[in-house]
């Protein structure tokens, strides 16, 4: 596939993607798209130094001015939405509407960040001492290292970068080695925006191209104040302790094993569509993809047979083609992991529908429905593929307990028209996930909410709400505007 026109419209010079030992392929047909050169240790060191120097300047640019840069970047994204969206599809294999949707998500978070740049509110606090004034202020933190995954190659970076930039931080991005081209394109658009911003320091945002060692170098560097890492729990388990060792900050958004409950009163047409999108959409490669489904036994047989029929008719194929709903898996390793999961399920006595490898180019599969009796074994693991484990339930409490009984805690949902059930699901004794939805699948979140989850999902929150606070440092300030020196808690120290 020739991407040179696309890359040139996105402003990426040929030398960045036509030479180097790292081959970039498209999952659409497995062909090579480009070759990129990894940054060596000294280049990475230099980029971190530049990000640190840029931070020292950027932190004193007023926040609403910083917002102006993000606004200009949002303009570039609007102008290049079609090209960047197409490149996302070519590089990671999601549907074209999803590639475009991802760029839309970037535009949305830019808009959000621009507004936020005038709302980085602190607090005033009532002091117990006369003539004293207490307040809490938020200050820029430092360079932020962003690790992103192949499945959302640009949107997840933008959640972090747009907030970090308006918070006065600078960014260093280590994209997935499977998707460096979209990162180079975004970097080029960002540089265009920065060139239109009077007095922007250079090097506010940079990309590191490389494999695992490149990420490790960034993670271990004490100049990088925050590491925001999105990806597998395995990756987070390595990143977390490494950053903790140097007392850096982490924001982890890791794996999910997201469940849905279809209750007796559910709108079954709506539930069916939602389940198909959430479990088979994006070829099951969202961290929020639906992986486990609990269906009430009174509707199980009719609902699951409709689900199987819908699955059998899902158009699988080239994600650039109109009408296709399921694109390819990212690579052969993903296909192997899917087959491994299905083999284990079979060994557990599951009944499997679908799951076949389709065609001889790219890594296409028929999404699989796996009916299991026991909520155990492979069902407790996240497999990044369209595998949906389906189980019966009798009592809502029991379904909620099972949904919560996995190590991950990202997203969850219930389909019901019974307000008591819906509220129970959302209550303190309901879903234990960071995201809980009613009559919506677990995936496809908007940027306005805080995004992330509990337990092995890592606890971090990105994107909306007050997630910005992770990118700033909090300072408690006390000012004595009297001539006396009263001590807190009534302590006496008269000299
Ligand atoms: C991810 O899969 O890493 O909720 C992020 C969603 C998207 C983000 C997913 N907005 O599906």
Image: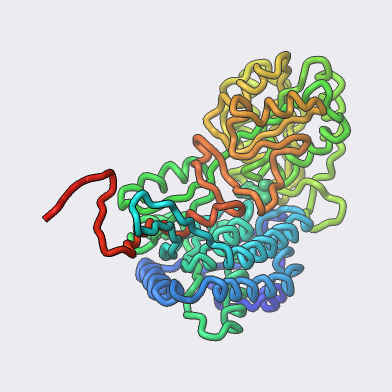
Query: Going by the image, does 433 lie left or right of 387?
Result: left
Query: Going by the image, does 83 lie left or right of 272?
Result: left
Give percent across and percent down for residue 100: 75, 61
Of residue 363 and residue 251, the one placed in the foreground of this image is 251
Q: Is residue 414 above or below residue 278?
A: above
Residue 13 in sight here = no
Query: Going by the image, does 89 lie left or right of 462?
Result: right
Looking at the image, which residue is at 64% across and 29% down?
427
What colouring method underlies this structural image?
rainbow
Which image quadrant: the C terminus? Answer: bottom left
Query: Going by the image, does 54 lie left or right of 423?
Result: left
The answer to which image quadrant residue 28 occupies is bottom right
Specify the farthest residue to the bottom. 198
Q: Is residue 347 above or below residue 52?
A: above
Give percent across and percent down for residue 126: 43, 51
Of residue 64 and residue 133, the one placed in the foreground of this image is 133
Give percent across and percent down for residue 233: 50, 41
Of residue 37 and residue 414, the one placed in the foreground of this image is 414
Residue 286 in sight here = yes
Give percent across and percent down for residue 298: 82, 15
The answer to which image quadrant residue 275 occupies is top right
Q: Is residue 436 above or below residue 353?
A: below
Which image quadrant: the N terminus? Answer: bottom right
Looking at the image, which residue is at 46% across and 56% down?
124
Q: Is residue 267 above or below residue 463?
A: above
How many labels were placed on the picture?
A: 0
Looking at the image, which residue is at 44% across and 75% down?
60
């Amino acid at each position: 596939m020739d991407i040179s026109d696309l890359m040139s419209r996105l402003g990426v010079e040929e030398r960045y993607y036509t030479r180097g030992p790292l081959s970039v392929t498209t999952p659409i047909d497995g062909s090579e798209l480009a070759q990129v050169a990894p940054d060596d240790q000294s280049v990475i060191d230099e980029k971190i130094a530049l990000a640190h120097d840029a931070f020292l300047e950027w932190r004193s640019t007023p926040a609403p001015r910083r917002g102006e840069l993000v606004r200009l970047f949002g303009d570039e994204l609007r102008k290049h939405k079609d090209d960047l969206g197409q490149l996302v599809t070519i590089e990671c294999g999601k549907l074209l509407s999803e590639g475009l949707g991802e760029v839309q998500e970037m535009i949305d978070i830019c808009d959000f960040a621009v507004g936020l740049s005038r709302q980085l509110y602190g607090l005033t606090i009532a002091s117990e001492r006369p003539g004293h004034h207490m307040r809490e202020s938020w200050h820029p933190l430092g360079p932020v290292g962003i690790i992103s995954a192949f499945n959302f190659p640009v949107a997840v970076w933008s959640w972090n970068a747009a907030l970090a930039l308006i918070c006065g931080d600078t960014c260093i991005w280590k994209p997935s080695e499977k998707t460096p081209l979209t990162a180079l394109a975004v970097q080029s658009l960002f540089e265009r925006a920065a060139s239109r911003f009077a007095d922007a320091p250079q090097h506010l945002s940079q990309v590191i191209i490389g494999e695992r060692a490149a990420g490790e170098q960034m993670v271990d560097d004490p100049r990088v104040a925050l590491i925001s890492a999105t990806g597998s729990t395995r990756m987070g388990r390595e990143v977390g302790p490494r950053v903790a060792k140097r007392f850096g900050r982490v924001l982890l958004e890791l794996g999910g094993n997201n469940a849905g409950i279809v209750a007796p009163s559910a709108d079954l047409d709506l539930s069916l569509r939602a389940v198909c999108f959430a479990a088979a959409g994006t070829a099951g490669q969202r961290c929020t993809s639906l992986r486990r489904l609990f269906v009430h036994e009174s509707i199980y047989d009719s609902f699951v047979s409709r689900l199987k029929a819908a699955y059998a008719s899902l158009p699988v194929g080239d994600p650039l083609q109109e009408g296709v709903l399921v694109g390819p898996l990212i690579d052969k390793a993903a296909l192997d992991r899917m087959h491994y999961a299905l083999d284990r399920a079979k060994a557990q006595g599951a009944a499997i529908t679908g799951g076949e490898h389709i065609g001889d180019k790219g890594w296409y599969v028929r999404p699989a429905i796996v009916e299991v009796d026991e909520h155990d074994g492979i069902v407790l693991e996240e497999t990044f593929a369209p595998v949906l484990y389906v189980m019966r339930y009798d009592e809502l409490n029991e379904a909620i307990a099972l949904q919560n009984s996995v190590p991950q805690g990202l997203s969850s949902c219930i389909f019901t028209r019974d307000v008591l059930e819906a509220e129970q699901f959302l209550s303190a004794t309901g879903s234990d996930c960071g995201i809980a939805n009613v009559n919506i699948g677990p995936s496809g979140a908007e940027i306005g909410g805080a995004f992330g989850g509990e337990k092995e999902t890592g606890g971090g929150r990105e994107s909306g709400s007050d997630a910005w606070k992770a990118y700033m440092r909090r300072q408690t300030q006390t000012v004595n505007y009297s001539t006396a020196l009263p001590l807190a808690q009534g302590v006496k120290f008269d000299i």
